[in-house]
Amino acid sequence: MIVKEVTEILEELAPLAYAEDFDNVGLLVGNQNSEVTGILVTLDTLENVVNEAIETNCNLIVSFHPIVFKGLKKITGNNYVERVVIKAIQHDIAIYSMHTALDNSANGVNAKICEVLQLQNTQMLIPQKNTIKKLTTYIPKAQAEKLKDSLFNAGAGNIGNYSNCSFTSEGIGTFKPNEAANPTIGEVGKRHSENETQIQITYQKSKETDILKALFENHPYEEVAYEIYNIENNNQHIGMGMLGSLTVPMSELEFLKYLKNKMNASCVRHSSLRGKPIQKVAVLGGSGAFAIGAAKASGADIFISSDIKYHEFFQAEEKIVIADIGHYETEQFTKNLLVDYLTKKIPNFAVRLSESKTNPINYL
């Protein structure tokens, strides 16, 4: 396989279009056409991870966090980011990062936390906006079903638990080809009227390239009339954080001990306890203080995340318990998720879970 083939598989799980605008995801170092000798999966790409890749003959590192986050004005080896990039280039090692694309995936970081905590009936905590689009096009009535099938096969028309969703209406389309035209239907210089079907269909913006390709390849007209609109609806299958429920409620102290054990946390920093049982749980891997309001609004009994500052704990206001278990701790199982996913997708290929320590925080 080449690097591009592996990254295309990863983007089925977490399309890069899911990533937040501030992020830096995708292939950060290396040539997408290089042949892959082995894949090393890690949370962070540090020098020890690159050394591990060299030792295990892995020339593609799949990393959750991007080693290059802000623009590099020079690469001289004066800091850990520059040293990693230099060493990777010297040894022809490609580095691919997923970060918030995987955060926003329905089967990504937060789904894995829910799995580890055995939460049921999961849903997005903060559904992503501006990720749903609508395509409208016009086609001769006889070819409408064939075009719809091609658009469905390209990924259009999925709404929640339903597929093949579209709306059609009938009407008369008119056009007059000029002398430079090569019309499929009608004659040059004459206005033509055609019984047409209007097709309206929604799709995820990450699928747009495939859907437009299907439209142009399966539409009979020389000039395809179509319109694309952004839909304001929230996307219930893409977003930050997740909500889930325990099968059996626990007391607050019982749950905090359960949380610490399940997430291999060295400690749990938390707001005041309310003296109420825990059943509805909100989670968000990584820095999640921005989601405290959403967690409270959801009716969750506890919000689990990391990097919560002193004053941000006050936002609990006795309406929710805020629990900070550490940044690494919330995301540590992400690399296991990726190894399992790649192993299932390419079972005959070498996919390794990095054994290098990358957590920069130590506890006494």
Image (cartoon, rainbow, N blue to C red):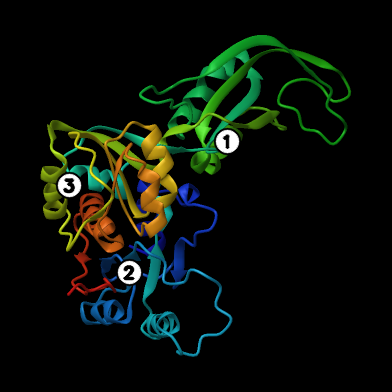
- Amino acid type at circle 3 is Val
Question: As drawn, is 127 to the left or to the right of 257?
Answer: right
Look at the numbered discs 1 and 3 and tell me whether their residues touch, using CB distance below 8 Å.
no
**Residue 217 sits in quarter:** top right
* The C terminus sits in image quarter: bottom left
In three-dimensional space, the C-alpha distance between marks 1 and 3, rounded to whole angstroms, equals 44 Å
Q: Secondary structure at mark 1?
A: helix
Mark 1, other Cα within 10 Å: few <14 / some 14–19 / many ≥20: few
Closer to the observer: label 2 or label 3?
Answer: 3
Q: Which residue is the site of mark 2?
A: 44
Question: Where is residue 201 shown, x and y percent of the image?
Answer: 54, 24
Q: Which residue is the site of mark 1?
A: 217
Look at the numbered discs 2 and 1 and tell me whether their residues touch, using CB distance below 8 Å.
no
Q: Nearer the viewer, residue 74 or 122?
A: 122
Nearer-N-terminus badge (1/3): 3
Q: Compared to 124, does 191 lie above or below?
A: above
Question: Where is residue 196 shown, x and y percent of the image?
Answer: 67, 14
Q: Residue at horizontal 10%, vertical 44%?
A: 254
Nearer-N-terminus badge (2/1): 2
Mark 3, other Cα within 10 Å: few <14 / some 14–19 / many ≥20: few
Closer to the observer: label 2 or label 1?
Answer: 2
Q: Compared to 318, does 355 lie above or below?
A: below
Q: Secondary structure at mark 3?
A: helix
**Residue 295 sits in quarter:** top left
Look at the image and tell me whether residue 172 can be seen.
Answer: yes
Q: Secondary structure at mark 2?
A: loop
Q: Which residue is the site of mark 3?
A: 116
- Amino acid type at circle 2 is Asp
